[in-house]
Image (cartoon, coloured by chain):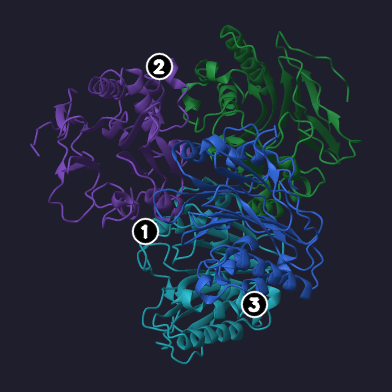
Chain colours: A blue, B cyan, C purple, D green
């Protein structure tokens, strides 16, 4: 995995120290690694220290081979730095991670958590808005139809925010996998959309918040307001998200 | 503080390694220190490592002078080891800590959390049953009447457990303070009551799970099913808790 | 790896909570995992928390497949709890771990560290006697002849201890590997020899401080004062260590 | 203490996220707090996480009152992130902290450590060049004459570096206290001198790497190549350091 995580010029490790396109100076509030190996359920390694100084992370990325993995560096938007709050999150065979924020989360936390059904509430081990989104998606048919589930939850969260009078935006770039297919989406209720890029190379797809190398030739922006699906066939497909007050849904073919 | 925390034969540090009366072998899943100093709100130092190896704890207990402080070593009953899950918990000028367990907590977590009102739900930063009890008490008039608030919450939790068909017990020994008065209670819905002792010496009250010295001469058990209140006058007072299926409420005068 | 590390009745995780034969109550001062996978250099995962509560460790042992790995739970004999002080230690393709103690280490630390040559001193990243032993062995021809190197270093350390008037013992059980062969030794300068067992099963060798299951049928004690070597052929071989004041060198055939 | 550590615009907490004058982007590799309270030996609180996310630090700085304290945020120059490597360091009644670097430390570590006498070598619990400098100073009469001791050690270190053919510089800004007097120095063997400022206000001296407020009116640079001493009288005094190849020793009266 270190071909992608630790070695490139603008690797995730480097991004933990200094992001260029993201809205925060650094991502030093923990990190995580999730990967699919020889087991149906994914492996998970998360810790609360900054990624840049973690010897375990360097060793694990050097050793572990995986055809499908997630890596994340966190900049807290308010909730505590604990392992349970680090991305990616895993439930059963699913991995999920998220950049962005439910605006006014403190105001809407209870109704957002109420989107999680009783069965999935037992997997609520942290306190982030991100984990709540994931469990809400699992509670809304993620296994059957990821696109519909994610769109439904984002719509409900927006309605909750509007009902509570929250002025700040809902911003979500997220990645999800069941070990076979990869899904991602990029959405914001205002004009400030978190960045999300992808690159297809030798039938391998890489999805990132920021391009890993300075030469951005091969990287394409995931179109705002779209859902990406990849697996089985040679290229990712995109579907527009139907969320009413979507700020910008113009499809820019990659 | 190290006169009580680190120096006695059977100090809290020693108890983190090996408890004698408690139901667990050790308390190595984090620890915490809360104290009242020159500020109205208490200081808090909590960490996830075992107390016995923490140099910071040794230095802090050696330096900090306080007339009223809480110290706790944790053995997790299932929830994650994170700072937010370590006792004591602090909200405003209150400190709270707890030994025991809400039986079948995974089954009743949602209705128990529903005992917390919206105002206090923002202080829910961890995932333990203990923090939920504390915030539920704050939501039920803790500031006005600690005895009534604690009794009300325990009754409601018992009702929730019975309604959910939980067979295992509710066991609570807890300590609470507002910086001026100290409250404690000892309760179990079955015959297995967590231990709780107190000692009055030179008008100073010490309340502990296990006596700090082997000579137990001066230590008295807090009577089961009772609420202890101390402050202002020379001795602690006890009030029986009115919780219907209380296993054992015989008052044994100290 | 979890077939050996987390699942048995008396697994390493269980041993971190309560040892039966070792001289300490528990091993809660960090842990480590080293393994050979598809790279010539071993992977390493070490942390300062108790092994029993570490979700990362559970996930990694569930995911990683390895034909040759080391796992260790630490009870500090005085040096700090830090990752750099956790076993196993890795330098190049070598893994090393150790139970035991250089008696009076504070008194003899400098001359023991002087057994490390300049080249290997750069790998001194912690402060334990164990890492010093490993680096001293690397400095004394470990790559050419592990038996001779380990014996030489133990002899030199004993001489240093005697010269410094140290009364307490040198006690070492250690395991070492280059990724292909496994070496272990069991030695004490007095009658209190740390336990070390092995089991050969389907051409696989397991070496442990304490048998993993209660039925000890298949486990054999490594004879005191002997060096074990395994690799290439079907069974381990034993060689007596030549250390003058060896307390007990009677060979008890397994 | 939070009047200085957490509240100013450009507080130490803010500096942990982004330094302006220092040579590194951030200081996220641990932090520390040392203070003199009612005991002759200082209190110490150090941890390996970034200072900006540490709730314990916020609580402690809010609670602890001290007339003389040290605070430090660390950007590692190569050695591991562990508590033992965090500043300040404490031995007996002394506190010491350091910004800068012994150039080529890996090459000269052994002879630099040889500057520590046997008595003080037992206090070597980490692996940094900074702790080695402190223990070497203690070994060269720090208790009797801090100025002479610090100057002697810096000269010896420079000689060791030159003898080893190290091309990179020795850069040191350091602060030291015995609980009564405060000492600091600013030195570099080349033109790149780490910044160091002081402010005298109501007979209180503050010494910092970077001014705490944007209005720099009251802050003065400690002159390069000088030793600052404060205590007993109303103002700090400065003495030039006699280190031959000193890059810049022009005294700029504050």
Of C103 and A93, nearer the camera is: A93
Secondary structure found at label 2? loop
Q: Is residue C174 above or below residue A69?
A: above
Spatial distance from mark 2 to mark 1, Cα to Cα? 42 Å
Spatial distance from mark 3 to mark 1, Cα to Cα? 33 Å
Tell me which chain the residue with mark 3 is part of.
B
Residue A177 percent coordinates (x, y): 53, 56
Q: Is residue C240 left or right of residue D117?
A: left
Callouts 3 and 1 on one subunit: yes
Q: Earlier in the sequence, mark 3 or mark 1?
A: 1
Of A178 and A127, nearer the camera is: A178
| Figure quadrant of residue A9 | top right
Of B4 and A218, nearer the camera is: A218
Residue drawn at 44 percent across, 68 percent down: B209
The reply to whether callout 3 and callout 1 are in contact (CB within 8 Å) is no
Residue B137 percent coordinates (x, y): 61, 79
Tell me which chain the residue with mark 2 is part of.
C
Q: Is residue B3 above or below residue D244?
A: below
Residue B179 makes an appearance in the image: no
Density class for disc 2 (Cα within 10 Å; few <14, some 14-19, many ≥20) is some
Res B18 label: 1
Task: Quickly name the residue at label 2.
Answer: C117
Spatial distance from mark 2 to mark 3, Cα to Cα? 63 Å
Q: Is residue A118 left or right of residue B95?
A: left
| Figure quadrant of residue A12 | top right
Res B138 label: 3
Residue A97 percent coordinates (x, y): 59, 55
Callout in the foreground (2, 3) = 2
Of A227 and A117, nearer the camera is: A227
């Amino acid at each position: 995995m270190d071909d992608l995580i630790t070695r490139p010029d603008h690797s995730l490790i480097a991004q933990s120290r200094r992001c260029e396109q993201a809205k925060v100076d650094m991502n030093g509030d923990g990190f995580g690694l999730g990967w699919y190996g020889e087991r149906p359920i994914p492996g998970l390694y998360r810790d609360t220290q900054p990624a840049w100084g973690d010897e375990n992370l360097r060793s694990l990325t050097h050793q572990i081979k995986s055809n499908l993995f997630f890596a994340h560096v966190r900049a807290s938007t308010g909730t505590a730095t604990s392992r349970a709050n680090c991305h990616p999150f895993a439930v059963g065979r699913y991995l999920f991670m998220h950049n962005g924020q439910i605006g006014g989360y403190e105001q809407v936390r209870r109704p957002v958590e109420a989107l999680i059904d009783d069965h999935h509430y037992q997997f609520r081990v942290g306190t982030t808005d991100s984990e709540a989104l994931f469990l809400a998606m699992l509670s809304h048919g993620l296994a059957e139809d990821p696109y519909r589930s994610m769109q439904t939850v984002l719509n409900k969260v927006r309605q909750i925010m509007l009902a509570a009078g929250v002025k700040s935006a809902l911003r979500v770039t997220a990645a999800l996998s069941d070990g076979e297919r990869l899904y991602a989406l990029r959405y914001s209720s205002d004009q400030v959309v978190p960045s999300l890029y992808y690159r297809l190379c030798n039938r391998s797809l890489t999805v990132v918040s920021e391009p890993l190398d300075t030469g951005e030739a091969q990287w394409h922006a995931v179109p705002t307001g779209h859902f990406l699906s990849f697996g089985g066939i040679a290229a990712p497909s995109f579907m527009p998200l139907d969320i009413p007050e979507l700020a910008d849904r113009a499809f820019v073919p990659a």
